[in-house]
Image (cartoon, grey):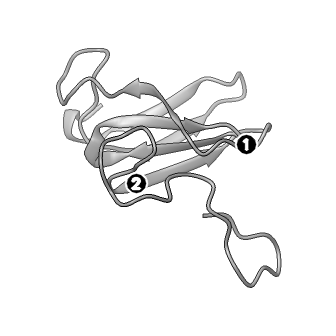
C-alpha cells in the first residue's frame, strides 16, 4: 500500500488479492523497496520469491526465486528484506538459507 503525504486512504500498488501463489498474489510479504522510477519490489516470503510491479500494472513479475525452496543460486527460502546499492544492484536477505 502507498500513502501520500497527508493521505486519508492508501492506494494498492502490489497484490490486492487473497494470499496465494499466482502472479497477482502475495503470501506474507515482509519487505518492500521502490526504485527511482516508482517500480515496487516486494519480498514475497512464503512464496520464496521477489516480485516486481512497474508503476501502473496490476500484475507483477518474479525477478528472483520462485523456483521452490532451496539453496541453489536460483532459489530463496523465506526472503525477508530488500535493498538497492548506488549502482542499481538488488540485494536480498535469504533468511532461512542464512545468506
Viewed as shown, does residue 60 lie left or right of 50? right
Using the image as rendered, state which of residue 23 and residue 34 is in the foreground. Answer: 23
- Check the image and name the residue furthest to the left: 70
- Check the image and name the residue furthest to the top: 73
- Tell me the element at label 1: loop
Residue 7, image quadrant = bottom right
Q: Which residue is mark 1?
A: 55
Viewed as shown, does residue 41 lie left or right of 50? right
Viewed as shown, does residue 28 lie left or right of 31? left
Viewed as shown, does residue 33 lie left or right of 75? right
Q: Image height check: is 85 above or below 42?
A: above
Quadrant for the C terminus, please. Answer: top left
Q: Residue at x 69, y 39 (%)?
A: 39
Residue 80 rendering spot, x and y as whole percentages? 37, 47
Tag 1: Cα neighbours inside 10 Å, few (<14), some, or many (≥20)?
few
- Tell me the element at label 2: strand
Q: Residue at x 30, y 14 (%)?
A: 73
Structural distance between the alpha carbons of marks 1 and 2 = 18 Å
Q: Residue at x 48, y 37 (%)?
A: 51
Residue 4 rendering spot, x and y as whole percentages? 79, 69
Quadrant for the N terminus, please. Answer: bottom right
Using the image as rendered, state which of residue 60 and residue 48 is in the foreground. Answer: 60
Q: Which residue is mark 2?
A: 29
Amino acid at each position: 500500500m502507498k500513502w501520500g503525504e497527508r493521505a486519508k486512504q492508501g492506494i494498492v500498488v502490489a497484490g490486492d488479492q487473497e494470499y496465494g501463489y499466482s502472479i497477482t498474489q502475495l503470501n506474507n510479504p515482509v519487505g518492500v523497496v521502490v526504485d527511482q522510477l516508482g517500480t515496487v519490489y516486494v519480498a514475497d516470503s512464503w512464496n520464496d520469491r521477489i516480485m516486481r510491479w512497474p508503476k501502473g500494472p496490476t500484475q507483477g513479475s518474479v525477478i528472483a526465486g520462485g523456483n521452490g525452496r532451496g539453496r541453489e543460486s536460483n532459489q530463496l527460502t523465506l526472503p525477508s528484506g530488500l535493498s538497492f546499492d548506488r549502482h542499481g544492484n538488488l540485494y536480498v536477505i535469504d533468511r532461512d538459507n542464512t545468506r
